[in-house]
Amino acid sequence: MTIPQTPQSVIPPLFAGLCDDAAIFPPGDLPLPQAVPAHLAHRTAWYAELVGPFLCGAGRIGALLEQLGDGAEHPGLGTDPLAVGLIVPDGSAGLEPALRAVAADPRLRIAGIEVLADQDGTAAEGVRKVRTALDKLLPEYAPGVDAAVEVTRGPELLLALDELESSPYRAKFRTGGTTPAAFPGELELASFLYAAVYRRLAFKCTAGLHHALRHDDAATGFAHHGFLNVLLATHAALEGAEHGELAALLSERDGELIAEKLTDLSHQQAQAARATFTAFGTCSIAEPLADLLALGLVSLP
């Protein structure tokens, strides 16, 4: 898809910063020499306000810095540091070295942190350990930066969310992957949304949300959730909807219906929905943008 370039932004506030750039993660797996220039192009395009930070795993920060070099080969970066969403898959033990590596280099700015809950105990214990590490380390390395703890799907999910309640941290929920089992069903995702809203927890999602609407992937046959379904279901949960209604919204495949309901949100309702569902990681920016254009929710400048 060829995307026109112009400095004007026409992204509605409902979608501002919704798509974190996960180009280097599966299934896209774009090499860093291609992913970095592509991200910088996104950040200077007319749709720039749709795009969040460049997501990078802690183990690839060194390679990212090598790719950035002295900045001369990336004129889109200018003198500004690259805003990075730091992904820490090693739990609390991996947090300090990852933060230190990014914070020590002026070419990078930590724009967000996502840490997998520790896996060597119960789900609640895993979240608690990461919370303790974040409480200790963020004031030193990344004051004021938003952090999310990835919770594990399964029977202990609610206990894990209990550990985040009343904390300054968000939940991160995995909505897909490279196998059918990686995709939660409508009712499971509805239960997560209900539980997060009940606990007044902001959250982000990751994986499987490349398109706006619920659909079956033509190549794999996997049933994918739609990011607009999640956004609308989040609004409904904030308005008091129960699990069944949320699951129905997540299963809806009528794009015109979803778009109409989202267009009807008041400014306050849209703000509340996005304050709760803050973003999702996607290895493609073009696909979500194309869907928003096709549904008339975003217009070309």
Image (spheres, rainbow, N blue to C red):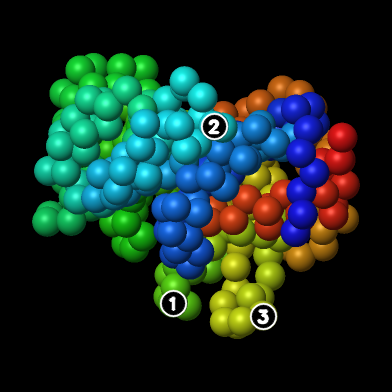
Residue located at (72% from left, 49% from top) = 289
Q: What residue is shown with label 1?
A: 179
Q: Gap in Å between the C-alphas at discs 3 and 1?
A: 14 Å
User: Picture coordinates of residue 59 (x, y %)?
Assistant: 24, 50
Give the camera-side residue of 86 and 201: 86
User: Picture coordinates of residue 175 (x, y %)?
Assistant: 49, 60
Q: Secondary structure at mark 1?
A: loop
Q: Mark number for residue 75? A: 2
User: Picture coordinates of residue 40 (x, y %)?
Assistant: 56, 38
Tell me which label, 3 or 1, sits earlier in the chain. 1
Residue located at (30% from left, 48% from top) = 63
Q: Gap in Å between the C-alphas at discs 1 and 2?
A: 39 Å
Q: What residue is shown with label 3?
A: 218
Look at label 3 and name its amino acid.
Answer: Ala
Give the camera-side residue of 138 and 248: 138
Q: Secondary structure at mark 2?
A: loop
Residue located at (50% from left, 36% from top) = 74
Q: Gap in Å between the C-alphas at discs 3 and 2?
A: 38 Å
Residue occupying the far front of the picture: 72
Give the camera-side residue of 22 and 261: 22
User: Picture coordinates of residue 201 (x, y %)?
Assistant: 44, 34
Direction from residue 49 to residue 278 in the image, left or right: left
Quarter of the figure with residue 181: bottom left
